[in-house]
Image (spheres, helix red, strand yellow):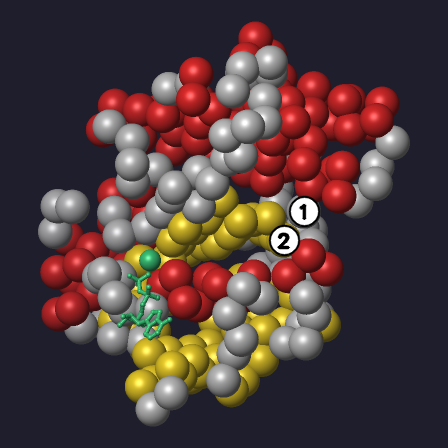
Amino acid sequence: MASVEIRNVVKRYGALEVVHGVSAEIADGEFVALVGPSGCGKSTLLRMIAGLEEISDGAVVIGGDIVNEVAPKDRNISMVFQNYALYPHMTVAQNMAFALRLARLPKDEQKKKVGEAATMLGLEGLLERYPGQLSGGQRQRVAMGRAIVRRPEVFLFDEPLSNLDAKLRVQMRAEIKGLHQRLRTTSIYVTHDQIEAMTMADRIVVMRDGNVEQIGTPLELFDNPRNLFVASFIGSPS
Ligand code: ADP
Ligand code: MG
C-alpha cells in the first residue's frame, strides 16, 4: 500500500479560495476519516488527492512521489462516491470488471478478480443483475466491488453511506472496516457523521472552512479537543 501526504494544499476557484493550505500525513495502511461541516472542503480535498481536481498550490504525495502532474488513472487510487455511479446498462459483473477491461487484463483474470471481490462483498448471486434490479445497499456493495477489484494502494471514500438508511449504514460501516482489516489498503473516508468517524477511523482529520482544525485518534479528539469547534463537532449527535 502507500502513504499519502498532503503538503500545504490550496484550492482556488477563480478569486475564491476554498482550501487554505492544508497539510496531513496518512500512513501506509491507515484508515483516516475526514470530517467537518458541509461546505468545509472535504470533497474538494479528496478530489485533489484523486487528481479529479487540479491543485492551486502545494503538493499531493503518494507513496513518496509527488503526483500533482499524474493523471487520476495512474495514481493507483480507487474512489467510492455517495451516488454509486454504476453503469445502468451493464450487469454487476460488467460494472465490476470495467476498470480491468480498460486496463486490457485478460478475460479469465478479469473473471477471477471479479469473483474474488464478489465473494468478499457477498455479491456472488447478483453478478448477472443490472443496477436497477438491486437495493441501495447492494448497489453500494457493487460500487465498493468496482473499487477493490483493482487492488489499489489507496481508497478514497466520499460519504459512501449517506444515501442508506440507518440500519444499513451501521452494517456497511462494519463491512468497510472488515474489508480494511483484510486488505489494509490506505483509506481516506469523508463523512459528516462523527459517529461513523469515531467508530471506523484510526485517526480523524477535522476540517472547518477550508482549514484543518485538529488531527488525532478518536480518543485524543474526544479527550483533548483543541477548541470549542472540535469539541462540539465531535460531541454532537449527527
Ligand atoms: P464539502 O465536501 O466539505 O461539503 P466541498 O469540497 O464540496 O465541501 O466544497 C467546499 C467549498 O468549495 C464550498 O464552499 C463550495 O461551494 C465550493 N466549491 C466546490 N466546488 C466548486 C466549484 N466548482 N466552483 C466554485 N466553488 C466550488
Ligand atoms: Mg462533499
Is the residue under label 2 in contact with that under label 1 (CB below 8 Å)?
Answer: yes
Density class for disc 2 (Cα within 10 Å; few <14, some 14-19, many ≥20) is: many
From the viewer's perspective, tell me whether residue 45 is left or right of residue 110: left
Instruction: Out of 134 and 183, give the one closest to the viewer.
Output: 134
From the viewer's perspective, tell me whether residue 133 is left or right of residue 180: left
Q: Please, is residue 53 above or below residue 125 in the view? A: below
Point out residue 166 in the picture as x, y percentages from the top left corner: 23, 29
Marking on residue 40: none
Q: Please, is residue 8 above or below residue 236 in the view? A: below
Read off the residue under disc 2.
77
Kind of element beneath mark 2: strand
Q: Residue at x 44, y 27 (%)?
A: 139
Q: Please, is residue 113 above or below residue 208 in the view? A: above
Q: Residue at x 23, y 61 (%)?
A: 38
The amino acid on which the numbered mark 1 sits, given as a three-letter code, is: Pro
Q: Residue at x 41, y 50 (%)?
A: 158
Point out residue 6 in the picture as x, y percentages from the top left corner: 53, 73
Please state the total of marks drawn on the protein image. Answer: 2
Q: Quadrant of residue 83?
A: top left
The amino acid on which the numbered mark 2 sits, given as a three-letter code, is: Ile
Kind of element beneath mark 1: loop
State whether label 2 is within 8 Å of ligand 2. Answer: no
**Which of disc 2 and disc 1 is earlier in sequence?**
2
The answer, for residue 80, to whether it is visible in the render is yes
Marking on residue 152: 1
